[in-house]
């Protein structure tokens, strides 16, 4: 019961009205530590309730501070605008019986309007790194007033190139009293270095090893021989698979826009979401998709982190993600909160090594599937026998006089279809770049 976590009575009243009776595992373990004021590093699977695990302690601290200390005290940094909006909505839900207000600082919206909101002194700011740094440099954001700092999906912010911005923001919030880091994956070397320099004697909670991050989702793959074949497979899946809502991921906005045009031409009702869309378009797209006016969302990895849209039970990787962490976050859009989900990856010959590495990273095997009438010519790399002596061939004796050296055995020609060695993930789940063959 949430009452056993000793949260403020106004928060318990909001939780009761929202019918939140039993905390999730991450909430049970993280909230008591956060209430003690300890720095915290949490790794837990998507859909496990991480947002409430850091929002509720912040609200509790704000409710217990002195009235004369009214100021912008809490800062939550996130990688995407969509995640910022989702967390702001959660704060408003949990703070419904309090005086606490939250404001977003994100790109795509008016800078002056945001500065005006800051002058009203909201207690909590939810921000993306780029826009937040602009406000700090313009002296419109009072960074030295921040006492509680949260970095949500910090590894994704590093992937997006915000390492320098994050360091500048952290330095500006020099008077903070508590720092919390939450993510679904452990991240890489740079994040570990930031963690070591940022957190003071932190408590580390690793609630799920990476092999369990997707245990509620069935994972399949279908081999494809070309982009056109992939389009046929996708169209069949969207027309015949049973699902309430589906997200189709591509690696580029160009591929997302191309698929959008092709699917609309086939009378599929779909939305498209990527970083080139302006803020209003992205907001309307997610609103209509969450309301169910369209059942299919085409998206780049802008939708892979943090979004919690009810009813998504199918994820299709039209393009295989470039890292194990990104794969985990993509399929994390389905199979949330104990519900079952299905993740299907469409695999061309250039994707095979990436898929193999993801399987090793997760310590899981994907189930191979063939769609009726759409079986292509590519079925995965051919298995090549290991090098060895040919069977039934006798070695010729060296009859040359003077004990001449034996001629080196001629190496067998390498079959053209022999696969290259699978890429191996580093400890952060990223596959190395392939070297060009001579």
Image: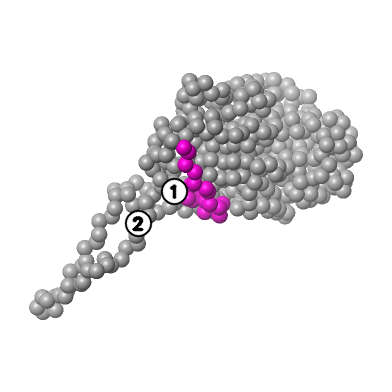
Circle 1 — which element? helix
Choose between 132 and 321: the one closer to the eye: 321
Residue bounds of the magenta highlight: 355-372
In three-dimensional space, the C-alpha distance between marks 2 and 1, rounded to whole angstroms, equals 16 Å
Residue depicted at x 22% and y 68%: 393
Q: Is residue 362 magenta?
A: yes
Kindly identify which numbered label has been placed on residue 329: none
Q: In the rendered image, which quarter is residue 154 located in?
A: top right
- Mark nearest the camera among 2 and 1 is 2
Q: Which residue is mark 2?
A: 384
Give the image location of residue 389, x and y in percent.
Answer: 28, 67
Percent across and percent down for residue 437 are 32, 48
The answer to whether 329 appears left or right of 141 in the picture is: left
How many dots with numbers? Answer: 2
Foreground residue among 367 and 257: 367
Q: Residue furthest front?
A: 372
Residue under label 1, please give it: 353
x 50%, y 24%: residue = 263
Q: Is residue 149 among what the camera can see?
A: no
Find out whether residue 272 is within the magenta segment. no
Looking at marks 2 and 1 on the same chain, the residue that comes earlier in the sequence is marked by 1
CA neighbours of label 2 inside 10 A, class few (<14), some (14 to 19), many (20+): few
Picture residue at 38% right of the left edge, 43% below the top = 378
* Quarter occupied by residue 395: bottom left
Q: Percent position (x, y) of residue 299?
A: 55, 31
Could you say which quadrant of the image residue 71 lies in?
top right
Seen at 24% across and 69% down, the residue is: 392
* Secondary structure category for the residue under label 2: loop
Residue 180 visible within the image: yes
Residue 321, percent from left and from top: 51, 41
- Classify residue 148 as left or right of residue 276: right
């Amino acid at each position: 019961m949430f009452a056993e976590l000793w949260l403020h009575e106004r928060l318990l009243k909001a939780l009761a009205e929202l019918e939140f009776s039993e905390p999730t595992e991450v909430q049970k373990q993280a909230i008591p530590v956060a209430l003690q004021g300890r720095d915290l590093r949490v790794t837990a699977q998507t859909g496990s309730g991480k947002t409430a695990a850091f929002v509720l302690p912040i609200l509790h601290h704000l409710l217990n501070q002195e009235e004369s200390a009214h100021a912008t005290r809490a800062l939550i940094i996130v990688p995407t605008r969509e995640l910022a909006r989702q967390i702001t909505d959660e704060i408003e839900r949990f703070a419904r019986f309090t005086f606490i207000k939250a404001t977003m600082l994100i790109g795509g919206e008016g800078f002056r309007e945001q500065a005006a909101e800051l002058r009203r002194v909201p207690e909590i700011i939810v921000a993306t790194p780029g826009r937040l740094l602009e406000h700090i440099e313009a002296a419109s954001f009072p960074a030295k007033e921040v006492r509680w700092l949260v970095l949500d999906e910090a590894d994704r912010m590093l992937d997006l190139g915000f390492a320098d911005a994050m360091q500048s923001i952290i330095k500006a919030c020099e008077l903070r009293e508590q720092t919390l880091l939450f993510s679904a994956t452990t991240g890489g070397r740079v994040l570990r270095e930031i963690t070591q320099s940022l957190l003071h004697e932190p408590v580390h909670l690793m609630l799920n090893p990476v092999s369990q991050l997707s245990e509620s989702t069935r994972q399949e793959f279908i081999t494809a021989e070309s982009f056109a074949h992939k389009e046929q497979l996708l169209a069949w899946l969207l027309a015949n698979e049973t699902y309430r809502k589906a997200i189709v991921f591509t690696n580029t906005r160009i591929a997302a826009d191309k698929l959008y045009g092709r699917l609309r031409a086939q009378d599929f009702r779909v939305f498209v979401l990527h970083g080139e869309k302006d803020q209003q378009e992205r907001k309307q797209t997610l609103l209509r998709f969450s309301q169910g006016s369209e059942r299919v969302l085409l998206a780049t990895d802008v939708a892979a982190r943090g979004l919690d849209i009810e009813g998504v039970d199918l994820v299709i990787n039209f393009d295989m993600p470039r890292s194990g962490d990104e794969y985990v976050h993509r399929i994390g859009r389905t199979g949330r909160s104990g519900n079952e989900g299905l993740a299907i990856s469409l695999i061309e010959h250039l994707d095979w090594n990436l898929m193999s590495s993801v399987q090793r990273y997760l310590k899981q095997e994907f189930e191979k599937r063939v769609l009726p009438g759409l079986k292509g010519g590519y079925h995965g790399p051919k298995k090549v026998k290991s090098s060895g002596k040919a069977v039934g061939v006798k070695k010729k004796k060296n009859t040359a006089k003077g004990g001449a050296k034996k001629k080196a055995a001629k190496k067998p020609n390498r079959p053209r279809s022999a696969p290259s060695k699978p890429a191996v993930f580093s400890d952060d789940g990223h596959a190395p770049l392939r070297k060009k063959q001579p």
